[in-house]
Amino acid sequence: MAKKKMMKGNMAIAEAALRGGMDIYAGYPITPSTEVMEYLSGRMIDLGRVFIQAESELAAINMVFGAGMMGKRAMTASSGPGMALKQEGMSYMARNNTPAVILNVTRWGTGLGSLNAGQTDYLRDTRGGGEGGYRNIVFAPNSIQEAVDITYDSFEVAEKYQNPVVIMTCANLGQMEEPCSFPEFKTERPTFDWAMDGTGRGIAARQRGEGSIEVVGQHTLDKVNAMIENEQRWETFEVEDAEYVFVAFGLPSRACKDTVKALRAKGEKVGLIRPITIWPFPVKAFAKLGSQVKGFISVEGTNVGQMVEDVALATKKVKTNLPCYLLNHGGNLPTVKQITAFYEGVKAGNIKEVF
Amino acid sequence: MKEMVFSGFGGQGVLTAGLIIADVALAHDMYATWIPSYGAEMRGGKANCVVKVDNEQVGTPSLEEADILMAMNIPSLEFAERVKAGGTILCDSDFVADIPEHRTRNDVEYYFIPFNQIAREIGNARGSNVVAAGVVTALLSDMFDKDTAKDAMLGFFEDKGKGKFAEGNTKAFYAGYDYMKSLLK
């Protein structure tokens, strides 16, 4: 790997996708994701790949759908209302067993939202987002280097399950800079018997039991179960003897880690579970916790609690009826001071649990 | 770990000054984060960035408590309350002649620096942000070596295709460095 250089999150992800073998990018610009397109508009052409600024988000996601069916590595990026428009296309991709990578550089808020970073798309993105019953694997990196590494391998994950993969960053991770380095361009490319080539090949792989609710339903269930079993990723920090465990993903998790360090220095027994995949949610991380745990604190960039629901479900793996608290810090990154004050409130019994 | 806020009007180069300091940190095998906040305007409007440098990976990149605030205008002094006790506030004396009473702190060091005038005097009127990078390097000279930092600054502009300004930028960087050193004596 080359020496690390400062780079903006959006551009670093774009470069990582190129090196991971992206054949086609189709998108429609929206703040705070636009640098992805801007960067690729030059790089894709230089590399002889396909770059399309589509007429709308709907057009872009369906171009990605088409390319994915052909076995091409396709990607799009968006945010807020733009991501909402793509959900129908993503549902069609899941139904038609089509790989693709979709980057959501999140905004905070409902409707138009705001340009602040937020995590208010959590439930939408972790539950599939479009019509029907399906799931997308959703990666939520907390540094630019991790975003690079995840993006680089994300096409293989999508191909393994023939399913869309979502990478969720946020306005802050997209716009900030920190040092990163890039792996080499991938040169090996598998051939896919499921890819359509105009001869009729691939149609059966797309539909999997056309007309049969049972066959399609079972196939989807098998796929989702395989993803739950194989793809949970997480990081834990100081959980071995922790009595209170913070749960946070993406950039806010870094403030939580700082808080754990500061509280540990004062003798407080706290730890952190950081989901790297927010779907499948890393239930396995909770199953490894000891019985000394007294409660969980979900720290999330939401207004109405979202991840706290998954935290509450995951606590069934520890012991029943553990309280789950919610620090919903809205559209700004939480500060160590804020998290510490919340923890002290929980410990003193001044904050009511959500579950 | 050092935490810095560079704040001013859009166009004053505060975002660039912050990026240069991040590159200076990398040149010293340190880790850095740079996170911007700015309006839609290229010129005018408020702009600021938070830069953190550390020997290990920086935790949260956003502002907690700043060691250094570079205030290139009066509105930037809103960050004064976020400077830690014993920290430093560097004011652009062309824009910040007096500190408004409600922004005054008695537990931090203030320095008033004529960034533009320094840049003009060495014949690089557009180099006040490079002067600023020199000033911060001098303030952190227990961490940063003057010439390693200067080379990092030149590399930053070279990567942007602005290598031809190396001579003027070197002068601006040293002028800022020397000015701050003279204040610290």
Image: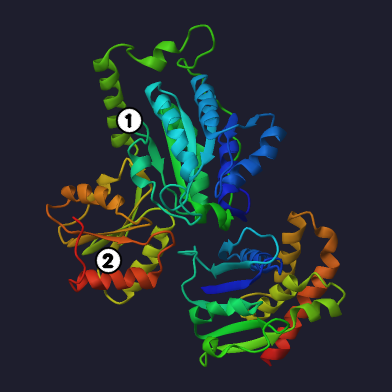
- Residue A324 x/y as whole percent: 21, 58
Question: Is residue B88 or residue A318 the one in the foreground?
Answer: B88
- Residue A164 x/y as whole percent: 43, 31
Q: Residue at x 56, y 27 (%)?
A: A188
Which structural element holds mark 2? strand
Task: Give the amino acid at mark 1.
Answer: Tyr
Whether residue A209 is visible here, answered yes or no, is: yes
Q: State which quadrant residue B185 falls in.
A: bottom right
Where's the C terminus of chain A, which quadrant? bottom left
Q: State which quadrant residue A87 falls in.
A: top left
Residue furthest left as drawn: A320
User: What chain is tagged by disc 1?
Assistant: A
Left-right relation of B34 to B81: right
Decide: is A234 above or below A131: below
Asked if marks 1 and 2 touch (Cβ < 8 Å), the reply is no
Question: Is residue B20 or residue A185 the one in the foreground?
Answer: B20
The residue beneath circle 1 is: A134
Q: State which quadrant residue B134 falls in.
A: bottom right
Whether residue A73 is visible here, answered yes or no, is: no
- Residue A121 x/y as whole percent: 39, 46
Q: Of discs 1 and 2, which sits in the foreground?
A: 1
User: What chain is tagged by disc 2?
Assistant: A
The residue beneath circle 2 is: A270
